[in-house]
Image: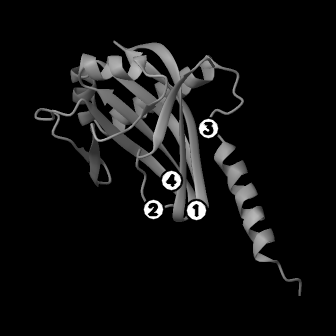
Amino acid sequence: MTQISRRTFTLSALAGMSVTAACGNGIGSPGSAVIDNRVEATVSYLYNTYPNTRDLADKSVGQLIMPLITEAGFGFGGGYGRGALRVNGVTVDYYSATKGSFGLQIGAQQFAHVLFFMTDDALQRFRRSSGWAAGADVEYVINDQADNLRAETTTSTSPVVAVIFGQAGLMVGATLEGVKYTRIIP
């Protein structure tokens, strides 16, 4: 029986997770057309699955739609995805989302998310920054039941509302803590 050292196991696991993290998230895609198609499909899925998010979109001044974020970790972790910023239903910029982490973690997951900018000031701060990180001014919409997202859209005073959905994988939880958004040219 062959014995595998911890170092070999760890390096193999990290290499496998790096490959997993690159699968299906737009890395190496031919550009904006692929991102736009994924964004359109994501928005359609969001509105059909969680109809209350239409009201949230109607009240917002812009939305950053990230169709697919892939995260993987084994002690050290990371995540990546690409998406589009839409204002009045029109794509105005493209963004990447990157995340790095360290700690007690193992596994991989994928999810989609949309940031709804509820004020002009929040949207302008996001667009002017060279790299914006989700912080304390983000309010999360939570998934109460399989097909129901709960958000106090009429009383929310948060400048940015985040909706995370479509989670799949073997990591526990999906948050936007530590995610940095950077404008890209696809």
Q: Which mark is residue 168?
A: 4
Query: Relative to 20, is 88 on the left or the right?
Result: left
Query: Relative to 22, is 160 on the left or the right?
Result: left
Toward the left, the furthest residue is: 155
**Numbered disc in front, either 4 or 2:** 2
- Packing grade of label 2 (10 A; few <14, some 14-19, many >=20) is few
Q: Residue at x 58, y 40 (%)?
A: 80
Image x and y of residue 50, in percent = 30, 39
At label 4, the amino acid type is: Ala
Which of 168 and 183 lies nearest the eye of the viewer? 183
The earlier-in-sequence mark between 2 and 1 is 1
Q: Is residue 170 visible?
A: no
Question: What residue would you read off at disc 2?
Answer: 172
Q: Pointers 1 and 4 in contact (CB under 8 A)?
A: no
Specify the quadrant that holds the C terminus. Answer: top right
Q: Pointers 2 and 1 in contact (CB under 8 A)?
A: yes
Disc 4 is placed on an element classified as strand
Question: What residue would you read off at disc 3?
Answer: 25
- The residues bearing labels 3 and 2 have C-alpha atoms spaced at a distance of 20 Å
- The residues bearing labels 4 and 2 have C-alpha atoms spaced at a distance of 10 Å
Disc 2 is placed on an element classified as loop
